[in-house]
Amino acid sequence: MKKYPYASLALTITALAAIALMPAGALAQKPAHVKLNSLLSRIPIPQSSAACYATCTTTTDASGVTSIKDLGPAFTTLQDELKSLMMADMSAMNNPAAPKSTPQAPTADEIAKMQADAMAKAQAYQQGGGANTAAMMQAQAQAHKQATAPSKANLLAMQNLSKAGEANQKIQSMLMEVRQKMVALHKEEPQIPPNCPEVRQGSYVGPTCACEYARGVTAEKNRVTVMDHYIQQRSAIIRNAIGQIQVQLGIVDQLMEDTKYGDAITDPTLLQLLWSAQRQAMSGVVEMLGASSGAWTDGSNTYLSLVNAQVNHCK
């Protein structure tokens, strides 16, 4: 029985998680114009095996055997958006921009101009008694101080980055709790139907096709019943975690809005810290997507087995 190719989604989640936890300063990039809470709220939460299977994209061959191609548009669309963010980060890492804070050595012409300006200011100071030139130099110093002082957006970012850091720590703690709860879950064993009796059929003695068919369908229904209960336990954990993570993502989302996703920031170090804060918070979205898609996969594949078992090949 064929199962859907899950490797692509798993690879995307793994790669994006690695980028999300990359240390600050590894990339010189602005935060993405995306609301993390919006992404989190779009993660489908499984309800039952049948419901999981119903959303999947399926194909059926000439013999009536069905295969699952993917989990459906709700997952693939969200996966594509996350993959787009991942590719943008990878592109920035492979083509890093020159750090904005790195000073450039002046050219010979620039040095000559600075010397000429200095000479002119000294001459003007001597000729004018220094009063006008002193006032001019004081005004220039004040302008330089204003130009180099942190902007309002920079100050706001510095004040709120610590809050975002605390939010990210809470998100990581919540994700750890989710992992622990998932591991602690107990999955029941499905009830196995009794074997079919042996019946003489001409020269052959053994179970009839009709009995084996009915037994197979019953066995798959029992597996679906057990899986439904298992999915409901996992869904409760996912739903509770998403509700808690949303509160923390709101703090990070607000910081991105206040700084116009980095467009209002002039300090390159702050820009990198904003990017890092957003990507670390994104790990909450990525891991919840992985938890949900994992449960969705188990449910849809279990129901797929029932669908294929119900294809009667007895003649």
Image (spheres, rainbow, N blue to C red):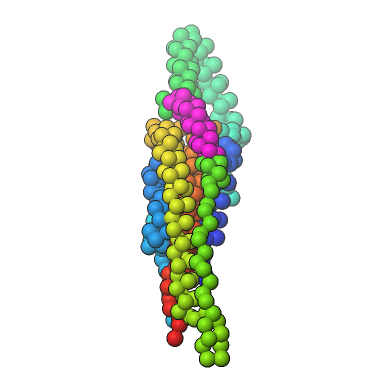
Question: Is residue 96 shown above or below 100?
Answer: below
Place of residue 91 in the rendered image (x, y in percent of width and height, measured from the top left): 54, 51
Residue 163 colored magenta? Answer: yes
Name the quadrant of the C terminus: bottom left
In the figure, residue 151 lies in which quadrant? top left
Residue range of the region highlighted in magenta in the rendering: 154-177
Which residue is at 45% across, 21% downward? 146
Q: Nearer the viewer, residue 258 or 148?
A: 258
Which residue is at 58% across, 25% downward? 115
Residue 194 colored magenta? Answer: no
Q: Nearer the viewer, residue 261 or 82?
A: 82
Place of residue 141 in the rendered image (x, y in percent of width and height, measured from the top left): 48, 17
Q: Main secondary structure of the magenta part?
A: helix
Q: Nearer the viewer, residue 241 or 272?
A: 241
Regarding residue 251, the answer to whether it shows in the image is: yes
Which residue is at 51% across, 68% downward? 194
Place of residue 236 in the rendered image (x, y in percent of width and height, measured from the top left): 43, 44
